[in-house]
Image (spheres, helix red, strand yellow):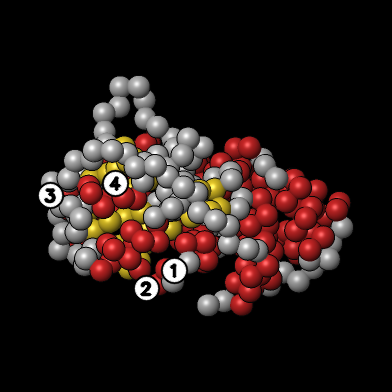
Amino acid sequence: MAKWTSVLREFQVPDPEFTVSSGEVSILEPLPKVVLFDVYGTLVCPLVGDLADQSRLASGEDSFVTTAERFGYSKNVGIKWHEWFFEAVAREHQEMKKKGIAPAEVQVDQIWVKMLERVGGDHSVVQAQRVAAYREMVANPVRAFSGAKAVLRTLKRRGMRLGIVSNSQFYTLPILGMTVEIDPDEFFEPEITFLSFRLGFAKPSPYFFRLVRSAVVQLACRPEEALVVGNDCENDVLAAQAHGLKALLFHGNDQSVRPGPPDWVGTTITSYESLLIACGI
């Protein structure tokens, strides 16, 4: 694993966010052979959300200042970074929209390479990743939802193929692993792990779940035998269902869930115990 991950050891792993069982949950038909998890708001409870949420709020000037001071820069540099960062994200989104890519995804470490260069610092990729990951941990700390670790182990033991469908950055899986206390490489198969920063576009782009569907079929599974679990009705549930995949809305808490429209008809679960029931376990 890259050297940048050493910066994660500066942060403590918080206690899990507890969930409450949904009550009666119907068993899915057909039973899933593949389960694909969103990360933010699903496996982990974030303070703010993914990068799109942070950009929308232009959040966390304090986190940039704290990061600047941690790496030997002044408060004024941190204030500049806050401005430059969200300007770069907005500019990238606008440029990609003109090319027909929406919603686009940026590569945060590359933005930090340029911002560090502008202030005359070490702007190697590894250093940019260390700074970016530190800022993320300060601005958007996450805690595991209770039961996440146990359900991943149970599904894996039962022979389920597990993957990720996440609007994410280079630091997402290492932070997930630290928070849930797992090795992501042992649980999630590369062929069905979809991270937006690698793709260049984000959910709910129709291309995202088109790729997911294609990968599922390559595993000799029917699309309806793949289950997506996510906290965002539009980005996760409806976007997955549009490509013939099964989907459950995860309502771990009121902060994280993004429910569907009033007329939406679908299945909501509020705990990982409920997920196991839905999977026939």
Instruction: Check disc 1 and report the residue beneath it.
Output: 182
Q: Secondary structure at mark 3?
A: loop
Q: Residue at x 42, y 45 (%)?
A: 19
**Who comes first in sequence, dot 4 or dot 1?**
1
Residue position for label 3? 30
Residue that appears at 79% across and 63% down: 70
Q: In this orientation, does residue 102 appear? A: no
Q: Earlier in the sequence, mark 4 or mark 3?
A: 3
Reply above or below: 57 against 183. above
Mark 4 and 1 residues: CB-CB less than 8 Å, in contact? no
Neighbours of disc 1 within 10 Å: few (<14), some (14-19), many (20+): some
What residue type is disc 2 on?
Glu
Q: Of the residues shown, which amino acid type is indicated by label 3?
A: Pro
Q: CB atoms at circles 4 and 2 under 8 Å apart?
A: no
User: Residue 249 placed where, x, y %?
Assistant: 34, 40
Nearer the N terminus, badge 4 or badge 2? 2
Instruction: Indicate the amino acid at tag 4.
Output: Ser
Name the secondary structure under disc 1.
loop
- 168 with respect to 250 (left or right): right
Give the residue at the far left of this rendering.
Answer: 30
The quarter of the image holding the C terminus is bottom left
Q: Residue at x 26, y 52 (%)?
A: 276
Q: Residue at x 47, y 62 (%)?
A: 180
Numbered mark located on residue 274 in the image: 4
Q: Please, what secondary structure does the residue beneath circle 4 have?
A: helix
Q: CA distance from mark 4 to mark 3?
A: 17 Å
The residue carrying mark 2 is 186
In the image, which disc is placed on residue 258? none
Which SS class for mark 2? helix
